[in-house]
Amino acid sequence: MNNLILLCVGVIVLCVGGLALVLIYNKPIFLVYFQIVYCASMRFLISELHFPEVLRFLPDAVTLMLFVHCILCIKRSEYIAVTKLPLFFIGGFLVLSVMSFFLNEQPILSLIWGIRVVVRAFVFWFACFLFLRKKDVVNMVQILMCILAINALAASFQYFIQGYSFDYVGGLFGVGTFPPRWPRRSTRPSGSPRR
């Protein structure tokens, strides 16, 4: 029962957050930038700063908004000729995926989840194709360089301050699992005797 309540609250928070995002700044370029920056830092927010797990689905809401923008943009005549071939391959891939699921008697929830995972990558790629210009690509490289520097700081924080080691140091990108509290990495010099 508690999980159902948390799920309902999470969906409400996701919908309200997505609506606020649409109302505040509903431009596709902003959504593409937001998607990249948020996806780069989402795992860190959840695993290290203990934000709610439902925030993993905020990129899906942004992808849905990008999908609507793509549909509206495709209706313009200059993009129809350019987008026919990629849309044909994406549609063919989805048809084959659905046929495969039914032929292999997979559960319908697995089909929905799989389509969600695959389609969001295509929608994001298509949104980048439609909305980004050359100057946006240059800006994105600069943003990614900043994210790289912040990631180095976050990984250093996890290693030196929190004592995480090996696979548990994920920086901004996170690892999706919480590291065990014991045993932690030793902070004593390698040649010093144990007490």
Image (cartoon, rainbow, N blue to C red):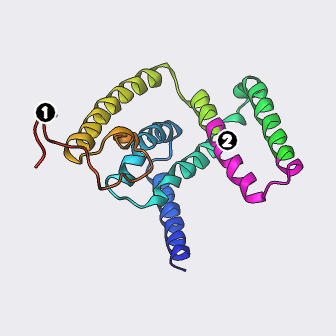
**Which quadrant would residue 128 be assigned to in this image?**
top right
Q: Position of residue 183 (x, y in %)?
A: 28, 51
Q: Position of residue 129 (x, y in %)?
A: 60, 27
Secondary structure under the numbered disc 1 in the rendered image: loop
Question: Compared with residue 148, is residue 39 higher up or lower down, i.e. above or below?
Answer: below
Q: Residue at x 58, y 48 (%)?
A: 65
**On-image quarter of the N terminus:** bottom right
Question: Compared with residue 93, is residue 9 higher up or lower down, i.e. above or below?
Answer: below
Question: Compared with residue 94, is residue 15 higher up or lower down, i.e. above or below?
Answer: below
Q: Residue at x 84, y 39 (%)?
A: 96
Q: Say which residue label 2 marks.
A: 118
Q: Say which residue label 1 marks.
A: 191
Contact? badges 2 and 1 (CB < 8 Å): no
Task: Bin the neighbour count of mark 2 within 10 Å (Cα to Cα): few under 14, some 14-19, many 20 and up.
Answer: some
Q: Residue furthest bottom?
A: 1
Secondary structure under the numbered disc 2 in the rendered image: helix
- In the image shown, does 81 or 38 lie closer to the viewer? 38
Based on the picture, tell me whether residue 116 belongs to the magenta stretch.
Answer: yes
- In the image shown, does 104 or 190 lie closer to the viewer? 190
Q: Position of residue 20 (x, y in %)?
A: 46, 58
Residue type (three-letter) at the residue carrying disc 2: Val
- In the image shown, does 170 or 31 lie closer to the viewer? 170
CA distance separating discs 2 and 1: 51 Å
Magenta span covers which residues? Answer: 101-122
